[in-house]
Image (tube, helix red, strand yellow):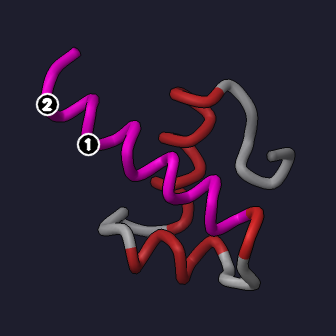
Amino acid sequence: MSLHEYIIKAKLKLVEIRLLNSNFTISEIADDLGFTDASHLSKTFKRYVGSSNRDF
């Protein structure tokens, strides 16, 4: 696993935790974790997790 992939997976784990345990919006989570925007976060989430962040 490359360093880039490791960082993405670590960020996505934080996304999962925030989706389950907070009232942050997708846009707020994307901003906090350094994604370009909510769309970029959603595409990355779907690619690595296999489901959309809304379905999660």
Residue projecting furthest to the top = 1
Which image quadrant is residue 10 in? top left
- Name the residue rendered at 18%, 34% in the picture: 4
Q: Are marks 2 and 1 in contact (CB under 8 Å)?
A: yes
Residue 5 highlighted magenta (yes or no): yes
Residue lying furthest left: 3
- Going 52% across and 28% down the picture, which residue do you hit? 48
Residue shown at 63% from the left, 60% from the top: 17
At mark 1, the secondary structure is helix
Q: Position of residue 42 (x, y in %)?
A: 59, 50
Please indicate whether residue 35 sits to the left or right of residue 21 in the image. left
For the residue pair 23 and 46, the one nearer the viewer reads as: 23
Q: Would residue 26 appear left or right of 33 to someone viewing this image? A: right
- Residue 8 to residue 40: above or below: above
Q: Residue at x 75, y 84 (%)?
A: 23
The quadrant of the image that shows the N terminus is top left
Question: Quick one: 54 or 40, which is closer to the camera?
Answer: 54
What residue is disc 2 on? 3
Q: Secondary structure at mark 2?
A: helix
> Residue 55, percent across and down?
86, 46
Residue 40 percent coordinates (x, y): 46, 54
For the stretch drawn in magenta, the main secondary structure is: helix
Label 2 is placed on what type of residue?
Leu
Residue 7 has which mark?
1
Tell me where the magenta segment starts and ends, as one range.
1-19
Please give left or right for residue 52 compared with residue 5 in the image: right
